[in-house]
Amino acid sequence: MGTLVVAADVDEAVVTATIARPDATATARHDPNTRRRGILAMIGRRLLFVVPVCAAVSAGLFAAASVSPFDPLVSYLGVRYTTTSDADKQLIAEQLGLDQPWYTTYWQWLHGVFTGDLGMSRSFGQSVAEMLTERAPWTLLLAGVGLALAVTVALVLGVVAGIRSGGLLDRTITALCITIQGLPPFVLSLGAIALFALGLGWLPVAGLTDAGADPTVGGVLRHLALPVAVLALSQSPWLLLAVRESVSVSRGEDFVAGAVSRGIPAATITRRHIVPTSLAPFVNVVGVRLPELVVGAVLVEEVFSWPGIAGAIVQSARDLDMALLAFLTVGTTLAVLLGSLLADVVVALLDPRVKTDG
C-alpha cells in the first residue's frame, strides 16, 4: 500500500507540473544555448533591414519634399515674403541651396550625418544637434511616463475585465475602451484642458513651466500631468483590450481547469498561471502600437505646447526644414524598428513556443 501511495503522489506531481506549465515538456526538449542562438540570429536578421529601411525612408522624404506645393521661403522670409521680388527670392533660394535637385540635397545631408554635421535648422535658428539636445529629454520624459502609465493601467484593468469576462465591470470597461479609442488624441487633449485646466483650474493649460519661471521639479510635474495623462489614455484601449482577451482565453485553458479542480485559490491561479501566459501577446501588441505612440506624442505636444522633438516635427514639416525633418523622421523610424525588435525579443524570451527562425 505504501508503494501505491508513493506512486500516486508521484503521478499527481507530474500531472500538476504538466497542468501548471503546459509547455514544460516541450521546453525541456530545447537546448537553452540553441534557443539563445536562435534569438541572436533573429536579432541579426532584423538589424540587417534597419539600414535599407532608414535609407529608403530618408530618400523618399527628400523626393516627396521636392514636389511639395509648399514654398520653404514663406517661413524663412515671414511677412517679407510678399514684398520680396522674384529675383531676390531666387537669390535667397540659391544661397540656401533650395534650387538644387533633391538627390543632391539628400547626398549632402547624408554626408553630413556620417561626418557628424547635422546641419542648421531654419525653423528654430540653431543647429540640429543643439535643438535635439534641448528637446529630446522632454520628449523621452513625456513618452516614457505615458507609455509606462498606459501599460500599468492596461495590465490592471485588463486582468480584472478578463477574469470577470461577461460581467458588468467587463462590459463597462470594454465600452469605455471602444469609446476612447474612437477619439483622436487632440480631442482628448482639448477635453482635458477644458475640464481640468479651464473649468476646474486644477492644472496649468500648457507649456513646461509658468510664464517667466525657471523649470523646477514641482512645476514640471504639474505641467506634465495633463499631457502624460492624455497620452496614456489614448494608448490604453488597445493594450487593455489585448490583455482582457488574452486573460479571458487563458481562463478556458485545461491547465486552469486542472488548477481549479485541485482547489488552488483563484488569486494564485491568476497570479502564477493566467497572467504569465498573457504577457507574451501583450508585449507583442505594445511593439505593434509604437508608431501610434509616436503619432500621439506629436499631437499631444502640439496641443499642450510641450517643448519636445515630436512637436518640432510639425514645425519642420510645415517649413520644409529638411535638415531637421529628415533627422527626426529617420530617428522616429529607427526608434519604431528597434522598439518592435525589442518587443519580439521579449516575447521570444517569455514564450519558448515562439519561433525565431522565420
Image (cartoon, helix red, strand yellow):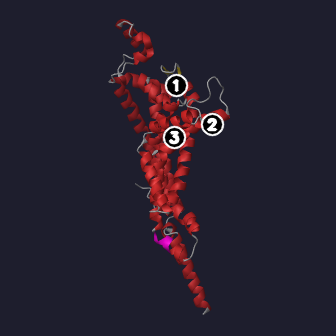
At label 1, the amino acid type is Val
Image location (x, y in percent) of residue 164: 49, 63
The quarter holding residue 98 reads top left
Highlighted range, magenta: 253-257
Q: Are marks 2 and 3 in contact (CB under 8 Å)?
A: no
Which corner quadrant holds the N terminus?
A: bottom right
At label 2, the amino acid type is Leu
Residue at 36 percent across and 25 percent down: it is: 65
Density class for disc 1 (Cα within 10 Å; few <14, some 14-19, many ≥20) is many
Which corner quadrant holds the C terminus?
A: bottom left
Dot 3 falls on a residue whose secondary structure is helix
Kindly report the distance in space between the C-alpha atoms of the residues bearing marks 1 and 3: 28 Å
Q: What residue is disc 2 on?
A: 221
Nearer to us in this view, 49 or 264: 264
Residue at 35 percent across and 8 percent down: it is: 86
Label whose residue precedes the other's in the sequence (2 or 3): 2
